[in-house]
Amino acid sequence: MLAIVAPGQGSQTPGFLRPWLELPTFAARLDWLGTVTGMDLVHYGTEADADTIRDTAIAQPLLVAAGSLAALELFPQPASAFGRVAVVAGHSVGELTAAAGVGILSVEAAMVLVRERGRLMAEAAAIRPTSMTAVIGGDRDEVLAAIEAAGLTPANNNGSGQIVAAGTTEQLEVLAQNPPHRARLIPLSVAGAFHTIHMQPAVDRLGQLARAVSTHDPRTKILSNADGQVVDSGVEYLQRMVSQVANPVRWDLCMQTLSDLGVTGILELPPAGTLTGIAKRNLKDVARFSLDTPDQLDEARAFVTEHGGPDQSAGTARRGLDPAHTTDED
């Protein structure tokens, strides 16, 4: 049973798309998505420095474009993914990559939404000084108690030994002065308390925009960051993605559901490594593949063959349906 996962903000590195642009189809599609968003995604993915692509308004569209287009290279005929991939999940902004991958919304709609998501979150972060700190190790209950005592939010719960606290810089300083026993604090280089109440202004505006977006029900199981549960409705999933901007990411619960479903292999889309690293600590019996560069595509396809279900695209074609372009009523 195969799961495909999409990473979130912070996974990007300077020049990570350079090898992918050697593929003509990837380069043409990235140019198109740059046109859709009005952003020079080619420059950001190849030449821009770390400080530039750390900007929330740039990082988020870049990540969704990278994951979406790599998935198209892995499955040149998208219909072939249905049946082979048992479940899909994205971490934070990766939920938009996942949503586009299972047909909830088009890649173009996902790119417009993520452009606005990144811009609105950056604006919300500028209202007052806020940030995030990773808490590594320690007793889970003690860590959560220390975060609460400082007035912070456990914005990312990434499973065993990794919780990210978020809030005002003053609250983070309180945590720094009162760290949980046997825990290591790592301040993150982000100018914002993402997935907390500080992002509510972004949620309000994003919700207005989302009401105009056409959605379809997912063609493959997709998990929500809110509670790790499978969501069957495209409308509900979009609503969850909007509210998730100001709510904690429960990746720990997503991993629990992957385990409960019996997943045997996890393939992470580029820029890969973060989520497979977390899975290594939390899902030790599950095989992992980090698809980071195009020269790994043949290996990735072999991994899909080993862990995925049968290719159902032929049967779909015989029925005259293209899963990527059907509606809820089909």
Image: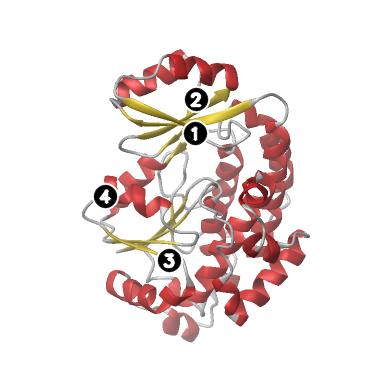
Residue, far left: 285
Q: How many marks?
A: 4
Q: Quadrant of the N terminus?
A: bottom left
Q: Which tag, 3 or 4, sits closer to the chain's start? A: 4
| Residue 160: percent from left, percent from top | 30, 37
Which residue lies under the disc numbered 2?
Answer: 153
Which residue lies under the disc numbered 3?
Answer: 291
Q: Callout 4, which amino acid?
A: Leu
The kind of secondary structure element at disc 3 is: loop
| Residue 216: percent from left, percent from top | 58, 60
The kind of secondary structure element at disc 4 is: loop
Residue 283: assigned label: 4
Q: Which tag, 1 or 4, sits closer to the chain's start? A: 1
Q: Against 254, is 41 above or below?
A: below
The kind of secondary structure element at disc 2 is: strand
Mark 4 and mark 2: Cα distance apart in space? 25 Å
| Residue 182: percent from left, percent from top | 29, 24
The kind of secondary structure element at disc 1 is: loop
Q: Callout 3, which amino acid?
A: Leu
Q: Specify whether 24 is left or right of 285.
A: right
